[in-house]
Structures are given as structure tokens and as C-alpha cells.
Amino acid sequence: MWSVTQACEDKEDEARPFPVIHVDPDACVLPDPALCAFNVLDDMLVTLVQGPTQWKMQLFERPCPGEEPRPGGQLGEVELSTCTPPGVVPEKPAAPSFLPVLCCVFPPGSRAPHGHPEGCGCFMLEEALFGLLFGADATLLQSPVILCGLPDGQLCCVVLKALVTCELAPGDPKVLVKILHHLEEPVVFIGALRAEPRAEEEARELLSDENVHSDCLVALGHQGRTLAIKASWSESGNLVPELREYDLPGPVLCAACGRDGRMYHSTPSNLCVVDVARRDAPWNLEKPDEATGGLPSMLCPASLNICGVVTLCVSTRASTGTRCR
């Protein structure tokens, strides 16, 4: 009996593409069944919990190596959005059909967390767009900002340092939450890319430059509704946030952004790439009269003839260009 069982286990191991790692229950950091998303930022742990009527963001001290696997003291907490329609009696929340998307945006010049490369749940935005989106508090505090894409379609943000300060000097926590947009369908992806084309010689440096920041924020809904936001010049010569919505093929399974201004997204039947960058004229930040710096009026997805992709990673370190995996 032992030999038959052992032979079956050997065959199962051979069939598995990767080894199975068993995690001890004692390694659990937050035993909360309502926990739906989290992000790790150096010494802090950001979580998103589903309550009876609202989503709740909580900020904890991250446990240090060698300590008990439990978070330290709670640093802050804020409620984000209504989970149930008005007039509905709150009940025990059911598991959401779509999980919220949680990522961190860093101001230019700040240091990203160790082991948290750009594109893996965090990215940096150029100064103009960062200030227009998140306001003076985030800019003056040089604070990271947590972006939340919720299953009800809301795209909202919380300034991290303001959340910690609010816990020390309590006020109205609702002022900490800013709703950027509403996609009216579940948000399944938030990313950033470079929509302004560079000169050819600058483009060559782009692949090796770690300090090049994105100038366009994108969010995708489950059915393909896409939001792009960047800083553009108004007719009066002022920098303003430009928001454009597009309709891409859906339903969206996953997506990823590349530094070349292209965004990849997968549906059950295809893997598509869209070019968000304006290739006609570079934008000169110091001379707004020479270019509009706007987003394209429409996006034209191109098929890569691959179907059923459920996760994506775009690498820009390849010597031959961008690789999509």
C-alpha cells in the first residue's frame, strides 16, 4: 500500500510545474476573513477590509523579522465607500465577486520600498500629475498615496502620511478619502505608463534609467471601460488633469503597462496591446504652445493572437526591447 501511494505522489509531483510550499497556520499575520487586499510598504502594512456597509482601510506596523507573525499597533483607519445600496438593511457581507485593487503611488524623488520594484503594486508619477491628482498635502508631505479600485467602480485615494497624522490628531476621517473617478463597473487593474513620447536619443536611455517616472495613470474595468489621466495644458496655458474614457474588448482577465506607452490586456479569447502614447509630437513642458500634450482620442487594440492569459508581467530590461510574459 505504501509503495502505491508513494508512486502516486511521485507522479503528482512530476505533474506539478512548481513545488507546493506548505505554510504553517502559525505564520498567519492577520486572521481576518473580511480581508480582501493588502500592500506592504517597508515598515507598514496596508489592508482593505470589507465591512457590513463600507470598505475599511487599515494601516498597521509591519512585524519585524524574528518577531511573532502579528502586526504591531494600528497606525490609522478610514472608511472608503458604501458596499450596499441605500435603503438596504446591512447584513453579514458576502464574499465579493471581484476583489478590490490596491496599489501605492510614490511622489517623484522619493525612495520606493526595498524589494518593491516599480510596477509590482507600486509606481512613481511625474510631479505635475502627482500634484494635480492628489493635492498639496501629498506634495508637501512627500507622502505615498494609496490608490483603491473598488468592485462598485470607484477609484479613490488616501494620502498615507495624512492618515497617520489623523490618527494622532483625530478629525473627520472622510476628508482623507478622495474619489478620483467612477468607472461604473468593477475595477480590475490600476497602472501607470509614459504617454508622452521622447526624442530618439532619450528613448534609448529610457531602458536603463531607473528614475524615469510615468506621466499617465490608467484604470481598467472588468468589461473593458478604460480611464486614462494625465497632466495637459488648457487653452489658458494652465496645467490641468485630462481624463479620457475608452472602451476596450472585455471581459478583462488581467493587464500590465510597459514603459514604452503600451498597455497589454487579456480577455478569454485574446491578448491585446494598445498604444496610449501620442507619437505625432513630443510634449515640451516648458513651452506649452508648441504641443497640446493630450491623450489620444481613441485607442486601437492590436491582437497578439494569444488567448486565455490570466496574469501578465512586462519587462523593460531586455536588450532587444520590451517583453511581455
Image (spheres, rainbow, N blue to C red):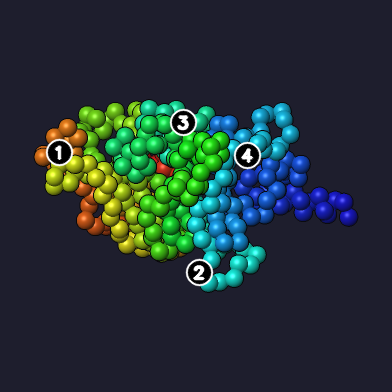
**Nearest to the observer: residue 5 or residue 197:** 197
Identity, as a three-letter code, of the amino acid under mark 3: Ala
**Vertical position of residue 315 compared to residue 310: above or below:** above
Do the residues under discs 3 and 1 have CB atoms within 8 angstroms?
no
Q: Residue at x 46, y 45 (%)?
A: 176
Residue bearing mark 3: 112
Give the SS element for disc 2: loop
Numbered disc in front, either 2 or 3: 2
Identity, as a three-letter code, of the amino acid under mark 2: Pro
Residue bearing mark 4: 74
**Nearest to the observer: residue 7 or residue 325:** 325
Q: CA distance from mark 2 to mark 3?
A: 40 Å
Q: Is residue 199 visible?
A: yes
Residue bearing mark 1: 288
**Vertical position of residue 193 compared to residue 55: above or below:** above
Between disc 1 and disc 2, whose residue precedes? 2
Drawn side of residue 92 relative to residue 193, left or right: right
Which quadrant: the C terminus?
A: top left
Q: Is residue 306 visible?
A: no
Which quadrant: the N terminus?
A: bottom right
Numbered disc in front, either 3 or 1: 1
